[in-house]
Image: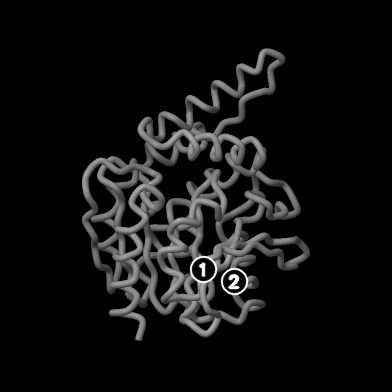
Amino acid sequence: MTVRRAYLDVDGIQLHYRSAGDPQCPPLLLLHQSPSSSAMYETLMTQLAGKYYLLAPDTPGFGNSDPLPGEVQALEIADYARVIHDFCCAMDILPCHVFGHHTGAAIAVQLEHDFPGSAVDMALSGPTLLNEEQKLGLPQLASPFPVEESGSHLQAMWQRLRDKDPEAPLAITQRELLSAFDSGDNYQASYRAVTRQDFEGQLPGISCPVLVFAGSEDPLYGAVEPALALLARGEGLELPGGERTYVCERQAELVAAALADFFDTNGN
């Protein structure tokens, strides 16, 4: 199944997105983590394209999407959610199924909080319900490396991303390295925005069904049960052990099956 790429003018910027499937099928919005792009969803999209019309935008400032105007470090998750909402309106897909991974999970919750009824139902992989230690430390995990004549900044970023998942295919790490450098200050800014979001306060107001999961080695695995406790209609999912932040790619078939089962059951 072909994954197509295109641009759309939204809120004064060009938003790049990937799409797959028949536009007559139920729409499914896919929101990626930082510093990735919609490229992380290509395998998953091919798995689901027979059932849904899939749209995966690059978050502003990532992939091939323009950054949002203004001071980058002052951006909030609400700023990203507003652009995604306007994208969905322009594509005429609301209400839709919504899936967000890590930063994408933060944006998914903010989207439904700020624009109730946008989500028919929602799935969150790695919910960003952070403790105080994580809030303090997260921006440091995306701190920039000054460009060095020796190229040592490339090795430093490579090691940072390998540490996320030492067993990930090298092609994924290389893609993420290029995305991290290409996103510039937006990488750390998105993490800072995640730490400022009132994710805990927003979850109880989400009235649609919500599937919550994370790989057992994902640093956000510990947030799954607390997130479920805050949701009115939360449902958990246990994945095979050992997966980290790239579960949507390394276990694409399994994740696709779980999403389809959840969306088909709850989205009618």
Q: Residue at x 37, y 30 (%)?
A: 166
Furthest toward the top, the residue is 150
Mark 2 and mark 1 in contact? Answer it, CB < 8 Å. yes
Q: Which residue is mark 2?
A: 85
Label 1 environment density (alpha carbons within 10 Å; few <14, some 14–19, many ≥20): many
Q: Quadrant of residue 258?
A: bottom left
Task: Residue 236 in the image: state x and y as whole percent.
Answer: 24, 62
Label 2 environment density (alpha carbons within 10 Å; few <14, some 14–19, many ≥20): many
Front-most of 85 and 253?
Answer: 253
| CA–CA distance in space, label 2 to label 1 | 7 Å
Q: Locate residue 38 relative to residue 109 in the image: left or right.
A: right
Q: Locate residue 29 relative to residue 267 in the image: left or right.
A: right
- Work out whether residue 7 can be spotted: yes
Q: Which residue is mark 1?
A: 111
Task: Residue 38 in the image: state x and y as whole percent.
Answer: 55, 55
Find numbered disc 2 in the image and state the secondary structure of the residue it sits on.
helix
Q: Is residue 174 above or below residue 241?
A: above
Q: Locate residue 161 relative to residue 235 in the image: left or right.
A: right
Task: Residue 201 in the image: state x and y as whole percent.
Answer: 40, 62
Furthest toward the right, the residue is 12
Find numbered disc 1 in the image and state the secondary structure of the residue it sits on.
helix
Q: Quadrant of the C terminus?
A: bottom left
Q: Residue at x 43, y 55 (%)?
A: 101
* Disc nearer the start of the sequence (2/1): 2
Q: Locate residue 178 relative to residue 211 in the image: left or right.
A: right
